[in-house]
């Protein structure tokens, strides 16, 4: 009889957003008249920008002719996209990253989940708490996290770095030394971020201890404040210790299109083994490339028209963030985030857990958000709302919350 991977069986309960969706479905079935507004999952609502759509059409037409048809894409990505990223996202900002250090992929979730494969099974990971669940769950599947304490909501072999009001929603250097440090700024779920000086302390720490930082920059496009770094490679020494993961989902609305990139500088080495070589081997073996059509759409993100249209799209969502943040403040809530990120993080009223507040908000305002405790034990007592709705639904949701 076959045996299943026992590590999968250690995963507790269902995925956070499945539980949120189930509760919403059950409420709707019991209250068919309720017009529920969803400010829960971080999915975009605006259509693709015209420059992207034009590039997609152009690429489809190319595929219709033998002379311009493209089969399998290079598994590390087309040169035109890797060069556009190297130039615009890095070199133009003073970061020393070359096109051949960028690996094109079909989603940051995929890369965040798969990257752990190139590290030893006995590596110890450190994560922010609360955290985007993918980092922890994929390490659970890989058998790296020890045993689960259901009461505490923690794994015995994971270092948790609490990010709460007390730490200004930023992690502090842990007492125990990790091998792999997951950082995500601007942060999902708290919407917080760090200054370049703060990030530099992490880079220095990683270089000193021999750890690797996996830096998730999925929300980079939402940064509005000058002192906030757009890339970890703005920090000195990051080339020897940091992997950066980029997504096209939130800056360009590609959640359903699927495109991302992972940067691995050739200077990150364990002995004389380059992480770059291991990821190239992994990508070459398990991935057959992101389609030409989608990579052409990605290239259009860096055109003049693309840049202009997408910055308007980001501004649209950030205006929603402002509506949410100011509205909640007027209603007496303690709120953070929403300035460099499309997430607003609020403290639940005294005596209410994150899930209590979820039920209360759904029942009294017919608004769905995400309980902070779903992102880790230090998320208890907090709640996340996203700015990715339409302007109209966001305004309506906040009006309802104010009347609660
Ligand atoms: N990383 C973070 C922190 C996210 O919040 C998300 C999606 O919400 C992703 C990665 C996934 O991005 P992608 O759509 O490129 O898979």
Image: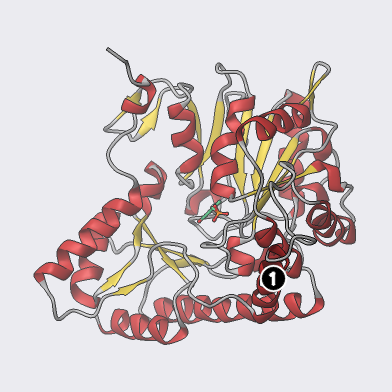
How many numbered marks, from 0 up?
A: 1
Q: Position of residue 94 (x, y in %)?
A: 90, 56
Which residue is at a point 63% across and 68% down the rendered structure image?
A: 252
Colour setup of the view: secondary structure
Q: Which residue is mark 1?
A: 61
Which residue is nearer to you in this view: 270 or 110? 110
Q: Secondary structure at mark 1?
A: helix
Placement of 100 over or under 19, stated as above or below? above
Quadrant for the N terminus in the image: top left
Which residue is at a point 34% across and 45% down the rendered structure image?
A: 15
Quadrant for the C terminus in the image: bottom left
156 vs 91, left or right, is left
- The residue positioned farthest toward the front in the image shown: 66
Dividing the picture into quadrants, the one containing residue 62 is bottom right
Residue 351 seen: no
- The residue positioned farthest toward the top in the image shown: 1
Placement of 350 over or under 285, stated as above or below? below
Which residue is nearer to you in this view: 78 or 236? 78
35 vs 169, left or right, is left
Which residue is nearer to you in this view: 278 or 386? 278
Q: Position of residue 231 (x, y in %)?
A: 75, 53
Residue 171 seen: yes
Circle 1 crowding by C-alpha within 10 Å: few under 14, some 14–19, many from 20: few
283 vs 233, left or right, is left
Q: Position of residue 349 (x, y in %)?
A: 29, 64
Dividing the picture into quadrants, the one containing residue 352 is bottom left
Placement of 383 over or under 205, stated as above or below? below
Q: Position of residue 26 (x, y in %)?
A: 15, 62
Which residue is at a point 62% across and 75% down the rendered structure image?
A: 314
Which residue is at a point 31% across and 82% down the rendered structure image?
A: 402
């Amino acid at each position: 009889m076959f045996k299943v991977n026992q590590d999968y069986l250690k995963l507790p309960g269902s995925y956070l957003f499945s539980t949120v969706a189930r509760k919403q479905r059950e409420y709707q079935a019991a209250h068919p008249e309720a017009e529920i507004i969803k400010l829960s999952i971080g999915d975009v609502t605006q259509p693709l920008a015209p420059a992207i759509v034009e590039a997609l059409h152009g690429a489809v037409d190319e595929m219709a002719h033998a002379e311009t048809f493209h089969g399998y894409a290079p598994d590390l990505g087309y040169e035109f996209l890797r060069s556009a990223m190297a130039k615009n996202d890095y070199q133009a900002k003073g970061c020393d990253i070359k096109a051949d250090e960028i690996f094109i992929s079909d989603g940051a979730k995929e890369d965040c989940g798969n990257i752990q494969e190139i590290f030893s099974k006995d590596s110890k990971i450190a994560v922010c708490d609360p955290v985007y669940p993918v980092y922890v769950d994929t390490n659970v599947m890989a058998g790296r996290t020890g045993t689960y304490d259901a009461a505490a909501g923690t794994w015995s072999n994971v270092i948790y770095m609490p990010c709460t009001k007390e730490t200004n929603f930023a992690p502090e250097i842990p007492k125990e030394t990790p091998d792999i440090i997951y950082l995500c700024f601007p942060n999902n779920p708290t919407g917080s971020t760090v200054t370049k000086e703060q990030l530099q302390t992490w880079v220095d720490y990683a270089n000193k201890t021999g750890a690797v930082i996996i830096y998730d920059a999925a929300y980079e496009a939402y940064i509005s404040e000058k002192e906030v770094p757009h890339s970890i490679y703005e920090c000195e020494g990051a080339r020897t210790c940091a992997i950066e993961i980029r997504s096209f989902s939130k800056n360009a609305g590609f959640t359903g299109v699927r495109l991302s990139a992972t940067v691995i500088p050739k200077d990150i080495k364990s002995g004389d083994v380059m992480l770059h070589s291991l990821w190239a081997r992994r990508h070459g073996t398990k991935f057959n490339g992101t389609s030409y059509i989608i990579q052409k759409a990605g290239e259009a993100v860096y055109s003049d028209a693309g840049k202009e249209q997408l910055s308007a799209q980001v501004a649209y969502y950030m205006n929603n963030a402002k509506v949410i943040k100011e509205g909640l403040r007027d209603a007496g809530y303690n709120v953070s985030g929403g300035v460099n990120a499309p997430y607003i993080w609020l403290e639940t009223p005294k005596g209410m857990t994150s899930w209590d507040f979820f039920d209360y908000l759904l029942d009294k305002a017919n608004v769905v958000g995400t309980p902070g405790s779903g992102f880790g034990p230090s998320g208890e007592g907090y709640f996340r709302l996203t700015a990715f709705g339409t302007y109209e639904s966001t305004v309506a949701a906040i009006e309802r919350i104010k009347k609660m």
